[in-house]
Image: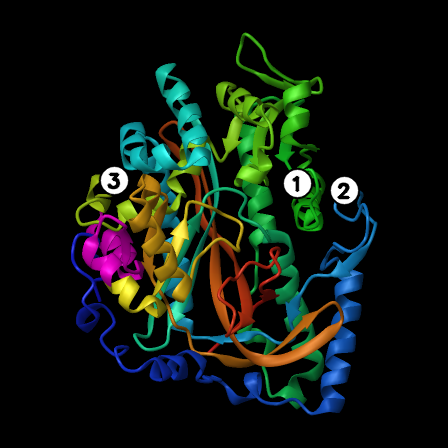
Amino acid sequence: MDLDTSSSPVPSSSLLPQRCGKSDELEEAHDETAPGPRSVSRNIPSGLLEKLVYDALVWCSLHGLVVGDKGVQRSGTDPGIGLVHAPFALLPMPFPKGHWRQACELAPIFNELVDRVSLDGKFLQDSLSRTKEVDAFTSRLLDIHSKILETNKTEDIRLGLHRSDYMLDAEANLLFQIELNTISSSFPGLSCLVSELHRNLINHYGKDLELDSRRVPGNTAVSRYAEALAKAWNEYNNSSAVVMVVVQTEEHNMYDQHWLCTLLREIHGVASVRKTLAEIDAEGQVLPDGNLLVGGQTVAVVYFRAGYSPNDYPSQSEWRARLLMEQSNAIKCPSISYHLVGTKKIQQELAKPNVLERFLENEDDIAKLRKCFAGLWNLENADAVKSAMERPEFFVLKPQREGGGNNIYGDNIRETLIRLQQDGSEQAAAYILMQRIFPKASLAYLVRKGICRQDHAISELGIYGAYLRNKDKAIMNDQCGYLMRTKVSSSNEGGVAAGFAVLDSIYLT
């Protein structure tokens, strides 16, 4: 099914053929329970449920499946203070094996695509030119990108740690990409622990649950990400240099990051430091030979777990730090170019006809990518805007933001589009319209702050990918593991850290 409709109208008869009935029919399609294997989604007897929840909470505490409790002071700055289990699903979510394989096979193709698009500075600047005029954050990123282009500086060693997120549309039975994350792809550490938790529970209670732990895929995200960082550090070829993790001033998800740095040290012998953007501005300098020094230490790899949101740049200090790092010869993960490739606008541009062919030659790879593209339109497309105003329930309005809680749904889409039209402003360039995906809901048990809630839930599958290249030598291009996030079906947003979802794993069917 080809949904490359960027330059065409959005006739519901072709784009969403089965969803043009009454709104109550849409609601029924959205909330309909699709349990998959009965044993995964069935009602669990109360006695067994209590044992499962108790054992799961103990397991989380003993194995580091934890986050900082936002209700406890210093829990986001000082390790060991105010720990609470990460929100999780008690049992894995059913997921078809064929679509699982499809998602895994896409990872190295998207990795290669990101790298090739990142090398085309003119494409990035031109595609984001109108967005730059109305979005201050994107404008600042593009300014840094322009300064790097003007110096003819090249990134010989390029490292990408990406995550491509998908939803399985129930009606079309197709896997659609939601977004491609090229900066701060979170939860490689905790996602692996959830897979282990589910295997552990099924091994103990599998007979009662009628489940087989072998159907929960192993998750190697944290070890493969550590391997990629170590290989990049090795390519830098300075044994005294460190990996610098750029972090937010307050980070309640620090243990996910610490898992990665711990493996980096214990398995690969690579030291890491944690610095905020403000600290980098105060302590950093680029030497005449291009080396980046922060706090007197040479930095081989800059790994961003911050810097993706305007909130991460409260002053000029943070912007100076970002430019300083880009001007150095340290390996950036991501570079400013990789960061820009992950914007919503570039996602929409790549879905246009004949654009993928500009960057990829393999026709099979191009076809695989196109198959997973949902409908994407800019707000200059009058037919798309008209359809979104008439039937906003079939669309999502997305700004150029990361981190969860930013997208616009339902009647708010219509209100936002009307406001943009009435203002006659250029602000419309800051948004894209996307076809809304409707997964089937399954009965799930969601555990947050020690309380288990039963509800109908839908899931989003993220596939981690790692890419490392030194000039013409491709060193790593792999699928590295997965992240499953599950939320109640009535929720629009899906971020775990933002409080909308829980961590999950998958049960192959």
Residue of label 1:
264
* Mark sitting earlier along the chain (2/3): 2
Is the stretch drawn in magenta largely helix, strand or loop?
helix
Q: State yes or no: residue 128 in magenta.
A: no
Of labels 2 and 1, the one closer to you: 2
The three-letter code of the residue at mark 1 reads Leu
Q: Are marks 2 and 1 in contact (CB under 8 Å)?
A: no
Residue at point 64%, 38% (across, down): 247
The foreground one among 359 and 458 is 458
Of labels 2 and 3, the one closer to you: 2
* Mark sitting earlier along the chain (3/1): 1
Magenta stretch, residue numbers: 362-386
Element type at marker 1? helix
Would residue 492 be found to the left or right of residue 272 on screen? left
Residue of label 3:
359
Q: Position of residue 308 (x, y in %)?
A: 52, 40
Q: Residues within 10 Å of mark 1 (few under 14, many from 20)?
A: many
Cα distance between the residues tagged 2 and 1: 21 Å
The three-letter code of the residue at mark 2 reads Thr
Task: Classify 22 as above or below 409.
Answer: below
Residue at point 44%, 57% (across, down): 165
* Mark sitting earlier along the chain (2/1): 2
Residue of label 2:
77
